[in-house]
Image (cartoon, rainbow, N blue to C red):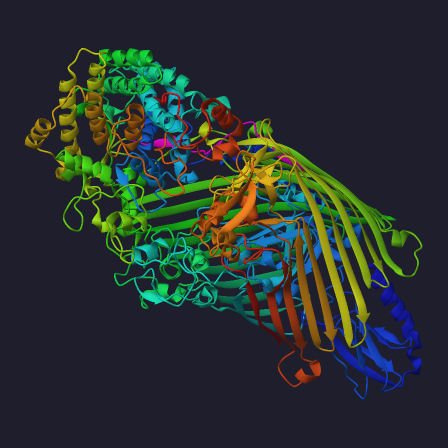
Amino acid sequence: MKILSYKIASLLLAGLFMVSSCDTDELIELNENPNAATEIDPSYMLANAMLRVSGDRYESWRGILIYSSTMIQHMAALQTYWAGDKYLYNNQYSGALFESAYPNYVKLLGAVLEQTKDDPTKGNVYGIARIMWVLGMSRLTDMYGDIPYSEAGRGFYDNTYSPQYDAQSAIYADMLMQLEQAPSTFDASLNDLGADGVQDIMFGGNMGKWEKFANSLMLRLGMRLIKVDPAMAQEYVTKAIAGGVMENNADIAYIQHTDGPEGINQNGLGQVFLADDIQRLSATFLNMLTNTNDPRLMAFATTNVDGIYKGLPNGYDATTIKVYEGVPADSSVSIELYSTTNPDMVKVSSPMFFQTYAEVEFLLAEAALRGWHSGNAAEHYNNGVTAAMEYLSMYGESTTITAEAIDQYLAENPFSEAAGMEMIGEQYWIATFLNEYESWANWRRTGYPVLTPVSYPGNITNGQIPRRLRYFENEYGSNGDAVNAAIARQGPDEFTTRMWWDVSE
Amino acid sequence: MALRSVLILSCLLLLGNAAFAQRNVTGTITDLSTDESLPGVNILVQGTTLGTVTNVEGSYTISVPDENSILVISSVGYETVEEKVGNRSTIDVVLSPDLTQLGEVVVTALGVEKQRKSLGYSVSEVKGESLVQAREINLGNALSGRVAGVNVSSAATGPAGSSRVVIRGSSSLGGNNNPLYVVDGVPIDNTQLGAAGMWGGTDSGDGLSSINPDDIAEISVLKGNTAAALYGSRASNGVILITTKKGTARKGIGVEVNSNLVFENIINNFDFQQEYGHGSRGVKPVTQDEALSYGNVSWGDQLDGSDVIQFDGVSRPYSYTGDPYKKFYETGLTFTNTLSLYGGNEDANYRFSASNLDNDAVMPNAGYNRKNFTMNVNGKFGERFTFSAKAQYSIENTENRPRLSDSPGNANFAVGTLPPSIDVTDAQGDPAKLGANAEGVELPISSNIYLTNPYWGAYQFQNSDDRQRMIGSAILRYDFTDWLYLQGRVGLDHYNVRITNLEPYGTAYKTLGGVVEGKRTVQEVNADFLLGVDKQFGSIGLNAFVGGNQMRRFDENMSINGQNFNIPFFSAVSNAANQSPSLTYNQKGINSLYGSVEVNYNEFLYLTVTGRNDWFSTLAPDKNSIFYPSVGGSFVFSEALAMPSWVSFGKVRAAWAQVGGDTDPYNIDLTYSLVGQGHQGAALAGISQENIPNANLQPLSVTETEVGFDLRFFEDRLGVDFAYYDRNTENDIVSASISSTSGYNGVVVNIGEMRNSGIELLVTGQPVVTSNFTWEVVFNMAQNNNEVLQLAEGIEFLSGDQARSQNVFVRHAIGYPYASIWGRRQKTIDGQKVYDADGLPVRSDDIELLGNGVHDFTSGITNSFRYKNFTFSALIDIKTGADLFSGTNLTAYGQGLHKATLEGRETGLTFSGVNENGEATTFNIAPENVQDYYSRLASDITDEFMYDASFAKLRSVQIGYTLPSSLLSNTPFAAASVSFVGRNLLLLWSNVDNTDPESTYSTTNNSQGLEWFGIPQYRTYGFNVNIKF
């Protein structure tokens, strides 16, 4: 009995030993996630970030289409949830880009910048990340005004849980500085973008094109300051031109999307059109194309049920449209009466354009008109129009415009220096169809094209086209002090509040 | 035990007086619920001192004076029975367990049985019988109202939903607040497998639904930390110990059949307006497009019977079409059959049971099936080895868990927002494919594609989950001597769930459709040992043990997500244009050592000290160890001191304990994951975590002090058990919600401090006890006060969920109870309500506290009556101190369905208030704009939709009849009973319009108090038949 007791006691001690001390290593190993890596090549995150900047269905639907495209009168819809068409407030839609951007591309680019800023072997990744950061951030600040910038996306590195909102003036200063400095770390001899630059899904590792894109973006953002700080605007426009901007459609900054295999590969706008094709082309937009006999009409628009091109006016619902169309109250107005976007432009595999050579030429034309640049405004204008028509072939055959048609259009609509600013603004507006963030921002800067606001009952802008969107509402809960400080500086969190660069003239 | 010994002894002494007996009566006494013979039962001849007790076979012989003698048959734990002798010479009696009396031996932590009087803490028990008749499919729900301090809530989803059981309030801000469930000594997994959120979804159930109530002998609730301290980190939310039925020594095989057939009907408290139809601004639609635009908008004209076009282009009379709830929901049915076989001898016993549960839910096309097989074997090998093994295999098939909350795929939403002029059955479309139009795609009832046709949602959306589960354990015990033993135990809980979730081709909001096929595997293995002594040294008793436990758990989730079907209506993942696989895996482990020493003095003064050390895999090696101590004592003064005769038992107790917990796996390091399948040759990667990881995390700790007393009077006919506790959680590991502009949604930190304090009272009484009639009352109540004391510097609250309207927020805020509800009120200036220039209400600038999502007062009253062989028992469940945010009412305001929105439709609204500058103004709103007023209330003024969620419900009723044994003597049946059973029969008291105060859509901690179109609550009623052979 006694011997058995000893045996059992020693077994017990062995058990104790097993359960506690010697198992520590095994315990710790349990906490290693087999499906996650502790280190990553930053170029993998960079490529992901590019797709995130291009956008997912969520913010593309709400931010680009429901709000921007309708406010700028590229598109129109009868449904009231298409809130931008009628200047209505929908908290979720208004905040969608803000909501989506920070945990996605801001977080990713923040991580890439952190991992590469002091690593000379990652100079290309670092420089590209800075440019993508500016592109992404410029969209955010142009939509909302003051936003978290300097402390954004750094929760892990600095333990900054409630990032402050930086003044838009400081954001622009930093963005322009970043664009200026970004190419300085480019080095073609580095291998940080993978074999043949495969990780660079925009330019395939062609650093010269990145440098042109950096300067072209500087041109865009510099020109944005024209109303608030013309001197600064001129400084950066001049600097950008001197540095070398896009020279042809081969320089265009865009993402080529694919059918799949997953949502991340797809064009966010294309995903929306799969789910929601209730919107139509705005009558404002269609009339402009029609009135100028613009060959892009057939590229952008489908014909309606009657085989003609007809736009839907902004600011109407299913009931009020009947008055507009002059049909009896007991009949209906079918949505099929109006032209919609050419499906070939909004496929899930369609390219998403960040900045086109055409836009650059229009900005150069404007710079020339302003005397900041020695070029010929008409020439830049013509180059811009030509490029804006030619690049559409990147969407596919149905959007390809012939050289004859382009020549004919330019002949029928010759550039006039007197009406130059307006003509450039209109062309910029047409050329940024589907790049609605930029289209809306440039309209707020230039006032062109001249748009007639809608007046829908219950609109929150007093019948004015919104000047900004309202912040993501969660910020009031999770970052209240910071957002309130921004409001104190910038003005009420309303659609009608003008941001720093959008000085009322 | 001592009490019973005294009784037996006194009875034996009385035997000596039986010399003058006239004749002998013999018989056998058996237990009603187990059909086993009962030894030691007292048999007394009423009004005399004649008496005896039954022998080990449960039989007795007694001499009685004459025919008029009455036998009083009593035993502790059973209801007393009186039988008139008459001319019978054999009197067999079946005793039914007395549910109000507390067992003297209770199961405590690690399955150790202890005498109740030795405990320094409160343990509550629920007998299996009370769960069997008026049963719930999910065991957790069956506890509602039964135990003081146990707060049960469930999701408004139907039969296979999850339950939320919280003991003594939520102890952790960020963690899981559900207790640990231990079945026969082995922890089981109770992971909530998925819940609906603000964007919709389904409640995917939890681990408790696999348990068959027919297999449960007893549930023991270890409420306080001291009670559960030996479970260490796993005990911070209390422990629920489930003891399953075992076989017993008996002659032959015992056979028991239990059948339970119940029907389910929704409780229709909806009282919406029936005067205005679909339309807008007082105008009927005149075209199909308009009718679609106003698919669920009831701001049209007064119903006048004229022909008005509807969503499908058909004109129908513009009149009230009847109650859509009645038309849409079905009568549910649950049929449960359990067969059990049991038996054994002195050395071994066994029990086997097989059970089948078939449910058709009130939601059309939804249902649940469960099959359980259990085997329980206990045996002795020689003098010193004892062995027991248990296995339960269950198969659960759930079909079409209803979508809840937001409208996509949610039939409840569509039914609940339909204008009174639209008949829900007109949305059926193709009778061969409900909810579809002639092309086979969704028949839209609205131009809002996210408002899914309810028939399409119920019949064409498909989700199913099939779970196979094995819970097994084996225990080997060796008794060195009669006071020293060693025990080893291994327990396994392993299940996999095969999930299919189809959004069909042709769904309006997803025209190409998609399907997710998944398989989730969860396993937890526990191995432990225990070395114990139990010895008396004179007047000092010692009961002590040391032990250790190793826990390993993994949770693996594989799925293939296929979106956009190539071939229409072919719902295979291989037919999807876009397919993406995913695999997630997480695992964790805890190693533990523990010990306990209990000493007593003369069995009236007890002191117990325990300690446990846990080592966690989830924390950094230098911070992963923590020691949890506890100390408790009790003084049974009724045994130590002279008491008046009407005091039958008295005890005071006190205890102190510390327990704690760790965090989820992979919370301490930043890691990266590959994303998707690359893009044009480029690899894509992202940061794995949405919350900022933290390598400095330490275990959280929960410290509780508890005092209480247990008094019984008048031979235990009145009992009062009272407890007060004060529990503090410190260093709580929370995922603090932070601004997403940081790149992360939250940060995992040791910041939380929260306090729960409260009282629990259990009163048991037997006001009437006669031979033919007994009345027993059990009343329990608990008040818990919860307060969040501290969060990280600069953080005033943690964010929980929001409801779909995005104007209401669940927060855990400093100075307020856990899960308080926040939103906006109408702005006031100097107490005057503010309206904008159009007369629409203006919301307050700040987000304010509007209510509390968790009931702080819970109570249950059970009245049980027995008249001869009839029993009647009813449980009334009462909860107060919580508020409900009702999305149903909010939507009913916004869409013009709520009765309150009738005001002003004909004449407009005129009221006074102040404008945004604070100037007194009279506002006039024209009839056609009245909808703007109510819609603004719905979108901006959250406070309008906050309701007091207090309620009283008739939770459970059973009316039973036990066939007298005399009737069964010539049948193969040993016992038979039949009952009418009902659950949730009546909502006795509520302050919520239209919807039920318990109809929250999720059982997760962060969405308590949010209601948004779950399935209506339903009542269950039917029959239970129990036969023993």
Is A200 situated above or below A190?
below
Q: Nearer the viewer, residue B653 or A234?
A: A234
Q: Nearer the viewer, residue B668 or B859?
A: B859
Q: Position of residue A179 (x, y in %)?
A: 31, 16
- Span of residues in magenta: B683-702
Is B582 situated above or below B386?
above
Q: Quadrant of the N terminus of chain B?
A: bottom right
Is residue B689 within the magenta segment?
yes
Q: Position of residue B664 (x, y in %)?
A: 53, 38
Question: Residue at coordinates 66% horizontally, 74% vertically from top-left?
Answer: B960
Total number of numbered discs in the rendering: 0
Is most of the magenta stretch helix, strand or loop?
loop
Q: Quadrant of the C terminus of chain B?
A: bottom right
* Image position of B12 (left or right of A38): right
Q: Nearer the viewer, residue B932 or B181?
A: B932
* Image position of A220 (left or right of B370): left
Is residue A4 within the magenta segment?
no
Q: Nearer the viewer, residue A351 or B494?
A: A351
Q: Position of residue B739 (x, y in %)?
A: 49, 30
Tell me, yes or no, if residue B746 can be seen here: no
Is A314 situated above or below B624?
below
Is B127 situated above or below B631?
below
